[in-house]
Image: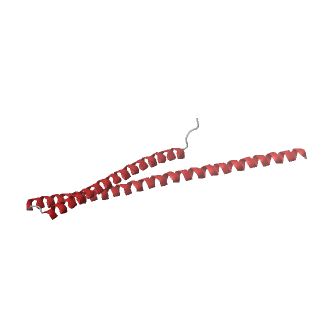
Amino acid sequence: MATKSPIDTLIEIAEKDTDDAAKKLGKAIRYHEETIAKLNLLIQYRDDYDLRFRENAAKGISASQYGNFMAFLGKLDSAVDGQKLVVKEAEKRVEFAKNAWQASEKKRLSYNTLDQRAKSILQQKEVKRDQKQTDDFAARTYFYKS
């Protein structure tokens, strides 16, 4: 079995790091989408409750009912504002995870580039060696024929 070169080991580690970073990015994106869905649900619930309040108010409601409606609307508004903060924090997590993934991918690509360059240089040396052997053989053949 051929032994691994140090660059192969670095590439392997970089690939694992990139995969891990991609998984974290995926989780961050899913969490962000969940927070947006919760925010939309809260906004929809708040709008429905507000509509119901307006319909009841048009029919006539007592002062205590009015106070209850307004207090609950205030709580819903606070919940919406709180969820907006959660969404912003989730956006920051996505951006952080994206940057981490990009850095890992850049490192992986750099190692691959270095590996390809090294292999190319080695291949060029082999071609030159083969050409030299062919030239030497042709020269010896010519020398012995004459």
The residue positioned 18% from the left and 63% from the top of the image is 54
Q: Quadrant of residue 37?
A: bottom left
Q: Left or right of 52: which side holds 99?
A: right
The residue positioned 18% from the left and 58% from the top of the image is 75
Indicate the position of residue 24 as horizontal and vertical percent values: 39, 49
- Would you place residue 129 above or below residue 48 in this image? above
Q: Nearer the viewer, residue 76 or 132?
A: 76
Q: Nearer the viewer, residue 82 or 57?
A: 57
Q: Left or right of 108: which side holds 42?
A: left
Q: Nearer the viewer, residue 69 or 5?
A: 69
Q: Nearer the viewer, residue 110 or 68?
A: 68
Indicate the position of residue 83 as horizontal and vertical percent values: 26, 56
In this view, which residue lies farthest toward the right? 146
Indicate the position of residue 18 as horizontal and vertical percent values: 45, 49
- Would you place residue 119 above or below residue 78 in this image? above
The residue positioned 8% from the left and 59% from the top of the image is 64
Q: How is the image coloured?
A: secondary structure
Quadrant placement of the N terminus: top right
Q: Left or right of 39: which side holds 116?
A: right
The residue positioned 9% from the left and 61% from the top of the image is 62
Indicate the position of residue 103 as horizontal and vertical percent values: 45, 55
